Image (spheres, rainbow, N blue to C red):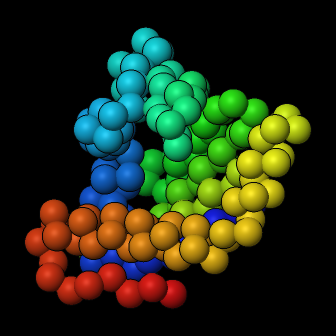
Amino acid sequence: MQFTNNEDIEASIEQTFGAVSDFENFERLALRRGAEIQRTDDLRCHGVGMTWKGMFDLRGTERAFKATILEFDEPHVVCGLVDTDGVDVELEINLIALSPNRTRLKVDVNLKSRTLSARLILQSARLAKNNLNRRFKQKVQNFAQDIEKYYGTSRASHQR
């Protein structure tokens, strides 16, 4: 199952990449939502090979996960893989500079099952694909608007 969304952001590509690669902020957000998360690598700077492990609750069931950064090409691309209970979640974020203060954010998420039970979960999720897709697009749009607010532009993002 795949989700894709593009948003144009009134911020430079460097500023946008800074927000996209602010992994410490994403860790704090996960903790606030009740997840347990721990960085497991020894890297001193952001890049390929950063890893995390943790637990989160999904519909009353504890799920373990491992996350890894697979590609880190500043200021253009961040790719990662999250492995959880038979489902691989591939995340790819691409940034394109449209002008010095405008950036296109493209987010692709691909879910792949590795087990029969995971395949059943993804098949049932496909029944709600329209709702999930709408929620995904809203989350990406909210993230883009947060970047714009942080960097002081009041103009809303435009979906392409």
Q: Can residue 133 be seen in this snapshot?
A: yes
Rendered view: 39 above or below 158: above
What residue is rendered at 26% in x and 65% in y?
147
Rendered view: 7 above or below 155: above
Q: For this view, does 86 lie left or right of residue 10?
A: right
Location of residue 155 (image quadrant)? bottom left
Report the residue that reaches farthest toward the front.
Answer: 60
Report the residue that reaches farthest toward the left.
Answer: 152
Q: For this view, does 75 lie left or right of residue 34?
A: right
Report the residue that reaches farthest toward the right.
Answer: 116
Q: Nearer the viewer, residue 119 or 4?
A: 119
Q: For this view, does 124 lie left or right of residue 26?
A: right
What residue is rendered at 48% in x and 70% in y?
135
Residue 28's x, y, as percent? Answer: 27, 36
Q: For this view, does 156 lie left or right of residue 106?
A: left
Q: Nearer the viewer, residue 67 or 42?
A: 67
Residue 33's x, y, as percent? Answer: 32, 41
Residue 90's x, y, as percent? Answer: 66, 47
What residue is rendered at 58% in x and 68% in y?
132
